[in-house]
Amino acid sequence: MRLKLSIFIAKFSALLSKKLLRRTGETIAGRVLLALYPKAISELAKGKKIICVSGTNGKTSTTKALVSIISKLGSVATSPSGSNLERGVAAALMTKSDYAVLEVDELHLSRVIEEAKPKVVLLLNLTRDQLHRMHEVKRVADRWAKSASAAPETLFVGDIDDPFVALALNSAAQSQRISFGGSKHQDGAVCPSCGKYLKWIRNNYKCACGLSNSNPDETFESGSAAYKNATMANVVGKFFGAKPIAIDEKSLERSVDQIRKGVKANIRLTKNPASWTEALKSITGENAVLIVNAREVDGIDTSWLWDISFSGLSGKRIVVCGERALDIAYRLHVEGIEAEIASNFDDAMAKFESGADVHVLAAYTAFHELVNS
Amino acid sequence: MSQIKIVRIHNELLGTYGDQGNAEVLEFRAKFHGITANIVDVTYNDDLPTNGDIYLLGGAEDAAQLLSLEALQRGDNLNILHMAIERGAVILAVCAGFQIIGNRFVANGQEVDGLGLLDVTSVPGDKRFVGDIKTTSSVLGFELTGFENHMGRTILGPTAQAFGKVITGHGNGDSKYDGAVSGNIFGTYMHGPILARNPEFADLLLTRATGRKYAQITDPLALKYATWRRKVI
């Protein structure tokens, strides 16, 4: 079937989905398009300058930041928020534009690079996440490295303080290696390049095989994950000649303010040990609600809750809810923190006084339900 | 004994699947029994302590598993484990750790000799088993739940006994049995962590390690959690 006709049908199905099912329709369009025209991504990518953003954490907010940076240079198509599989990419590319900034799932990056032939790929970080699906961190890193070596026309930009990102950048013909002066890595005990025990001195690593964060092309001051991601987005923007944006960490964190049951909730997306650890640092107040689900996109196994230290919550008022509230309640219990268990989010919020400030850390599915409701 | 030493072996390498929580649960349950537990973290370059009461190994990716094996074969470490077993210490090894303490296993396509503490041999299968697992153990006398995420197929030799009979899931690969046990040495594919999901098993390990029988403790949340998981899996 011809591409134009396929796009027409895809857009029509999205419209139907919107009108009849009241869905956003964006992923439906991508799905239908790929079913009718499997080569759609490579066809639609032609003539567009494409940037892919991938990594365990920060993909969505970094993609948004990059869109705002690049939009000063020309029209920009982008993925529907959080839709980062091939269908999301296809949906984004249906829009006519000069540029496309695409958020891409770690495991799907190889195929998107192959088909869309991006000018730049930004690799943020790689840590343990959804192991029921990713299986092993190293497996994802090896795929990245393989696709980097197979894409000599593409510039790979990333944070080499993360050894897995460094491995991918080392495999690329063109790379921009960024360092923020080093940082610890939960999965950094083994060199992803040679398999030996990786030598760390404080926050920096150097392996006998040559993998190291000591030789970056560009160095920035250390900071929060949100700051690092925005800084790297600016580096990518600079490659296209765009002016850097001011870094506003608050707006880069995926958090939303809502008033629920008279309580002021700051809701933040948390989905794996690295993002929980980052989010826990932001809890400055006395009240927190933790929501844990274990659906496919949350990770169907909750063992990773034991990778996180919750000791910073000690002495605060903690309420837990979600489908796996008991998993988090018991994990906290063993760390000496007694949480109240609520049957749902509204019930959790009702436990606080009217006007109270509450930090909410929400699993992926819970976050989307709360933000879209 | 009012003090026990829990040795968490190579958490930096064998901590990918959350099994480090087993040490915390043991420490927590020990407190209920009036025992002071001391968790000792052993890293790749360290020697194993000779006076551990419970030695723990967790799940890992292949390269990390090989490094851990290498470190445990280094110097006096294996001898220390043999002596610990002699004096009745407990070993709990999960997933990659379970394979390490067996006779042979394959990692990164390489077939290697394990520590030979359990009479089992593991080979990779062609399908990865990912999902909830429930077993019933005649050794323990109760049901266990956990989460498995592995490609291992483990065959038991004559001196090892199966640890659990599979109700849901795949375990050693035949979907019949999970893990192996020999005396105070326990091997399993169950993450969760297994001792968080099954607090009675933590108590049993404490009993075995100290040689004392403890009165049943009251921890309603632990019981509620364990019971709920057994009901839904």
Image (cartoon, rainbow, N blue to C red):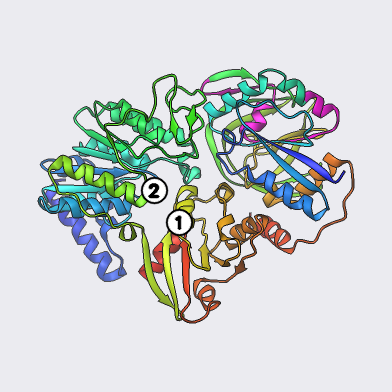
Looking at the image, tell me whether mark 1 or mark 2 is earlier in sequence order.
Answer: 2
| Residue at image point 43% right, 71% down | A265
Mark 1 nearby-residue class (10 Å; few <14, some 14–19, many ≥20) = many
Amino acid type, mark 2: Asn
Q: Residue furthest right?
A: B212
**Mark carried by residue A57:** 2
Occupied quadrant, residue B110: top right
Q: Is the residue B180 above or below the residue A250 in the image? A: above
Name the front one of labels 1 and 2.
Answer: 1
- The N terminus of chain A, quarter of image: top left
Q: Is mark 1 on a helix, strand or loop?
A: helix
Lateral position of residue A279 relative to residue B213, left or right:
left
Q: Is the residue B224 above or below the residue B156 in the image? A: below
- The C terminus of chain A, quarter of image: bottom left
* Residue A47 image position (x, y, % from top left): 10, 41
Residue A357 shows in this picture: yes
Chain to which mark 1 belongs: A
Mark 2 nearby-residue class (10 Å; few <14, some 14–19, many ≥20) = many
The boundaries of the magenta stretch are: B82-109
Q: Distance between the residues labelled 1 and 2?
A: 12 Å
Is B103 in the magenta?
Answer: yes
* Residue A3 image position (x, y, % from top left): 14, 47
Amino acid type, mark 1: Ala
